[in-house]
Every structure is written in structure tokens, then in C-alpha cells.
Image (tube, helix red, strand yellow):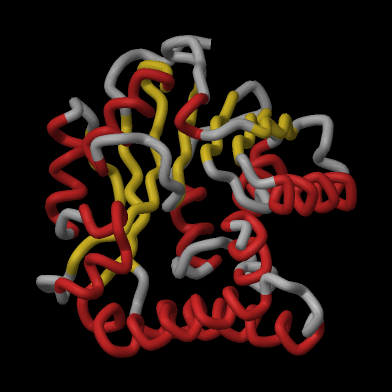
Amino acid sequence: MNHHKFSAVAHRDHDYCNPISAAKIERLLELLPLDETSRVLDLGCGRAELALRIIEKFGSTVVAVDHSSYMLDAARERAEWTGALGKLHLDDTDIRDFRADPETYHLSVMMGAGGIAGGMAGICNQLKAWTKGGGYLLIGEGYWRGKPHPEYATLLGADAQHLDHRGNVQAGIDAGLIPMHATTASTDEWDEYEWKFCRSVERYAREQPDDPDVPAMMERIQRWRDAYLRWGRDSRGFAVYLFHRPGARIG
């Protein structure tokens, strides 16, 4: 089963591929002093909903990186429909292989996408290197609200290396960043995200019963749903953190 295909199917009804509500995303955007001269990096952009919203709100130029052709095709279609394609540069690259010159972007974004080693600390340090002095980092990352069950940690794999909420903020401070705001997903937002995730796969299985990937997709989504209800709903959180990189803004 293709991981990118599964994720595209499971997220096809989500605006953002994480449990934070659109209203909370808007609040974060209100705190950003971007304009039409700003350059933005969005790593793991998915269908580029956030990138398109930044273009719509500020007129900024966005480099949106993802390694899923399914997601990038959807992003391109959305950008064409909204007239934003001239400001959106889609890059089909694995995050692990992405390179940029130091201090290139006024805002660097990574919303729950894997690919940078070292957990929250590694993400903060790498995005800081690509962000201009006086710029901002917007990072979506999981955190533990309680000690995870060992079976749940095994299921999550690398994602189980979360810190707690305070630990994520401290990782930014330790990287030399200034925390400006953080917003966490409520239980209702988690439920909305997870049940929509499951429904999308279930519906795909009904619509495409002859797809040879369907049995594996169904086995995976049923195991995931059970783990969320059994363990994840009470122990795992997700937050978006806004950090400022000190220094005078240049260009």
C-alpha cells in the first residue's frame, strides 16, 4: 500500500491535515507581519491550504514542499482555481532532501510533517537556519498529555518521540527563538479530525471495492481508530507554535 495514497484518501475531506481548527489558524495568521514582499516556506504542505491562505491574506510568495504527487496535484488544482498559482511554487521533494540558503524566508512553516531528525529541537534549529533575522517560524507538532501506552508508542513509531507541551515551547527557546503564541487542539477538534480521517477511508473502500489496496487500507484504518479510542484520545495532543527569530528584518 502506498503511504502517500493512503494519506491523500484519508485527508481528502480535511481543509488542514491536522486537528487544529481553521479559526485557530486564522488567529495565528493575524499575528504575522507579512506582506507581498515576504517569502514563505511551507514544508509538508499537503494540499497547500495554509500556503494558499497566506497568499490570499498577505500576497506573499510561498515555496510549498511535499513528496506526495497526490497532494501536489490537489494543491495545483486549488491554486489554479483561486488564481494563486503565480505566487505558489510547488516543490516535489522529500523534506529530508530539501535544501535552502541560510536566512531565505520571512516565515518558515512545518505543520506536523515528518522528515527533520531530532524531534522538535531538530525542527526548530533547521527552520531557524532558513529563516531571516526578524522572521517567524510556525510549527505544528504533537505532544504528550500523559505517558503513552507502550503499544500506542510502538504503533506511532518515530512520532512517539514527542515531548510534552511545555517541552515543545522550551525546544524553541533552547534554539534561540522567542515563543509568541501557541494553540492546542481540543478534544472536539481531535474527534472531528480523527473521525473524518476514518470516514474518508471507509467511503473510499465502498466507492472503489476493486482497488487492490483497499484491504490493507481498511486494516490500517481500523487499527488506527481502535488505538485512538483506546489510548490516543486521552494521551496525545497537537499544538501549533509561533516563534520569532531575533534580529533585524532584512529585505
Residue 231 falls left or right of residue 77: left
* Residue 145 image point, x, y percent: 17, 71
Task: Residue at 22%, 36% (x, y): give it.
Answer: 121
Task: Residue at 83%, 30% (x, y): give it.
Answer: 86
* Residue 159 image point, x, y percent: 31, 56
Task: Residue at 23%, 30% (x, y): give it.
Answer: 177
Residue 32 visible, this orientation = yes
* Residue 12 image point, x, y percent: 69, 69
Q: Nearer the viewer, residue 251 or 83?
A: 83
Quadrant in the picture for residue 123: top left
* Residue 223 image point, x, y percent: 42, 82
Quadrant in the picture for residue 210: bottom right
Residue 182 visible, this orientation = no
Residue 172 falls left or right of residue 94: left
Q: Is residue 217 above or below residue 106?
A: below
Task: Residue at 36%, 13% (x, y): give it.
Answer: 248
Number of residue marks: 0
Q: Is residue 55 above or below residue 166?
A: above
In the picture, the quarter occupied by the N terminus is: bottom right
Q: Residue furthest front?
A: 212
Quadrant in the picture for residue 197: bottom right
Residue 158 falls left or right of residue 6: left
Q: Is residue 218 above or below residue 168?
A: below
